[in-house]
Amino acid sequence: MGCLWNILIFRHHSFRYSSYCTYMFIGSITSLIHISFSLTDRIIDKGLKIDWTANSIVWCKIRHYIAHCTALITLSCLAASAIDQFFSTCCQIKWRSLSSIHTTRQICIYFIIFWMLITIPNLIYVKPVEFASNKRLCQYTSLIWSQLINYFFHLCCYGILPWILMSLFGCLTFRKMHQIRNRRIGIVPSIVLSRMAHMDDQLSSILFFTNHCLYSIINSF
């Protein structure tokens, strides 16, 4: 429900042409796909006692591929939204020009294509494996790819890197917004100023709270 609500909010005409809201919109869609596949598998496994990932080689491969692909796209969009919001508050035109809807759409397409290609080995090196106890599990058959998943993707792409980027640029954005608000005093009427500041604060709070929630959801599966 949260992802659906985010999709509806960020498709509103007020946010439709906002670059960092576009990142959140794409991230919410891929997060919804990620959660749907993960929950469907767990409901069938725990509720119906049917382990599709262990019995179906097709489902085993597709689930791993889509789970990793959508999670990485989501986290990339979350980090990009924090960076984009920082650029939008910069005074220098060369940095502020990077925060545009055209650039955002191109970057989102690059993210999707890049992670779809990078995670293709999940379709090759994942399949149901039978152990000595006659138990079948969906496992990686390549030791190199398994180590790459554990020590690069899980550690860096899912953990350290997105959190560092979102925290760093989040703090820089709030600092910039505080500086901008101080400059507006005496130039913009107080009523307009309070309304603009309130809208900026609300949007920033929504974005960073959504980032935190989506990041927690992705890393819980």
Image: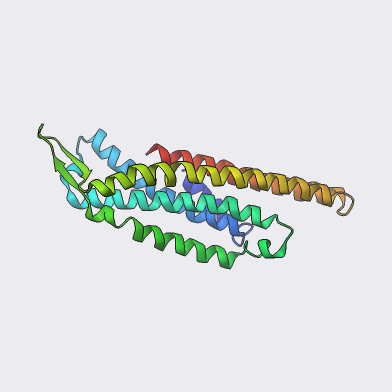
Q: Residue most toward the right?
A: 186
In the rendered structure, the answer to whether residue 85 lies left or right of residue 122 reads right
Q: Nearer the viewer, residue 75 or 40?
A: 75
Q: Nearer the viewer, residue 178 or 92?
A: 92
User: Residue 203: in sight, yes or no?
Assistant: yes
| Residue 130 vertical placement versus 7 (above, below) | above
**Residue 146: image location, x then y, percent:** 28, 45
**Residue 35: image location, x then y, percent:** 38, 44
User: Residue 195: in sight, yes or no?
Assistant: no
**Residue 74: image location, x then y, percent:** 46, 51
Total residue callouts: 0
| Residue 98 vertical placement versus 208 (above, below) | below
In the rendered structure, the answer to whether residue 220 lies left or right of residue 23 reads left
In the rendered structure, the answer to whether residue 174 lies left or right of residue 111 reads right
Q: Residue most toward the top?
A: 133
User: Which picture quadrant has residue 90?
Assistant: bottom right
* x 40%, y 63%: residue: 113
**Residue 68: image location, x then y, percent:** 35, 49
* x 30%, y 43%: residue: 40
In the rendered structure, the answer to whether residue 189 lies left or right of residue 203 reads right
* x 28%, y 42%: residue: 41
* x 59%, y 53%: residue: 83
